[in-house]
């Protein structure tokens, strides 16, 4: 059965949110990008992979996890693919409020969430790339378990194991890899703190490429939790075969 969708208008101001000792975990998947490097006939998140759309695999990882209360997918206002790419589920809502950038889409999605569920300030939001369909139940559990009650939040990441080179117009330099990590997703932060960090970043001049960088601009230190190579982001056509082989082996 195809997903029945209705447009959701993101509120301009955040309603008053409650605080409670019983916290929830929400997944937020920005899926408004076009995936230009894939050179495909549709955005890459809608390409078929092992019998389902890439986006469906990504959504399934959260729907099948017992600790995730609800899954939100943020698409562009004129998206014409998502209704056929996702199967309906009581714990899944599509938000037609995607923006020009990833941070815009996540920020708009955070605002739109509150019209759908009773979000609390301290609830956790796991932001995950739509094009990372290799996310497993074990990785979600690992991330949630690693983030303690007093932590800012954190993200999955992989330690750099290859030698890193920095090339300029006049030189080639080897960069020490000790302490270097490759960021993955989910990136997990508290609802109110993440929304505030993204709002502040949008008002500034420093470009942010993920949620963790917005938190870092607030002087906060997210925790790095080791991920897995199978949680790779599909960017180029050659990535499809690698991720499909991983999903089939799993």
Image (cartoon, rainbow, N blue to C red):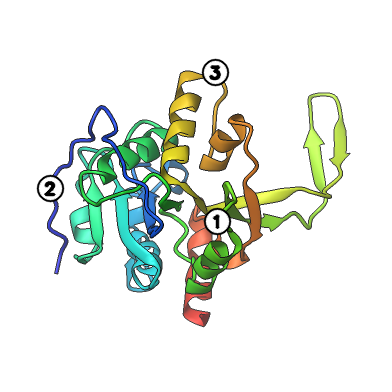
Q: Position of residue 119 (x, y in %)?
A: 31, 49
Which label's residue is closer to the chain start, 1 or 2?
2
Does the residue at mark 1 contact the one at mark 3 (Cβ under 8 Å)?
Answer: no
Front-lying residue, 204 or 115: 115
Quarter of image, res 148: bottom right
Q: Nearer the viewer, mark 1 or mark 3?
A: 1
Image-based side of 210 in relation to 54, left or right = right
Front-lying residue, 199 or 241: 199
Quarter of image, res 68: bottom left
Q: How many marks?
A: 3
Under tag 1, what secondary structure?
loop
Q: Is residue 163 visible?
A: yes
Q: Residue at x 64, y 59 (%)?
A: 225
Q: Would you name the residue on which mark 1 appears? A: 149
Front-lying residue, 221 or 129: 221
Q: Would you name the residue on which mark 3 appears? A: 205
Q: Residue at x 29, y 33 (%)?
A: 14
C-alpha gap between disc 1 and disc 3: 32 Å
Q: Residue at x 40, y 51 (%)?
A: 123
Which label's residue is closer to the chain start, 1 or 3?
1
Q: Is residue 242 visible?
A: no
C-alpha gap between disc 3 and disc 2: 35 Å
Image-based side of 157 in relation to 209, left or right = right
Q: Which mark is residue 6?
A: 2
């Amino acid at each position: 059965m195809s997903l029945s969708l209705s447009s959701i208008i993101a509120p301009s101001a955040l309603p008053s949110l409650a605080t409670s000792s019983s916290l929830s975990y929400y997944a937020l998947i920005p899926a408004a990008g076009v995936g230009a490097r894939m050179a495909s006939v549709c955005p890459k998140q809608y390409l078929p992979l092992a019998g389902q759309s890439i986006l469906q695999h990504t959504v399934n990882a959260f729907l099948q996890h017992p600790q995730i209360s609800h899954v939100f997918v943020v698409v562009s206002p004129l998206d014409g693919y998502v209704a056929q790419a996702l199967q309906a589920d009581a714990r899944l809502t599509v938000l037609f409020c995607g923006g020009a950038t990833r941070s815009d889409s996540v920020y708009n999605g955070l605002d739109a969430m509150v019209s759908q569920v009773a979000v609390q300030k301290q609830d956790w939001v796991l932001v995950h790339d739509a094009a990372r369909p290799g996310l497993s139940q074990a990785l979600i559990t690992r991330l949630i378990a690693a983030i303690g009650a007093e932590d800012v939040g954190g993200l999955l990441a992989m330690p750099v194991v290859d030698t890193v080179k920095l090339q300029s117009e006049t030189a080639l330099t080897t960069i020490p890899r000790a302490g270097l990590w490759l960021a993955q997703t989910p990136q997990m932060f508290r609802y109110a703190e993440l929304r505030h960090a993204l709002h502040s970043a949008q008002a500034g001049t420093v470009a942010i490429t993920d949620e963790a960088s917005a938190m870092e601009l607030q002087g906060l230190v997210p925790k790095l939790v080791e991920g897995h190579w199978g949680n790779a982001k599909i960017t180029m056509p050659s990535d499809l075969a690698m991720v499909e082989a991983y999903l089939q082996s799993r």
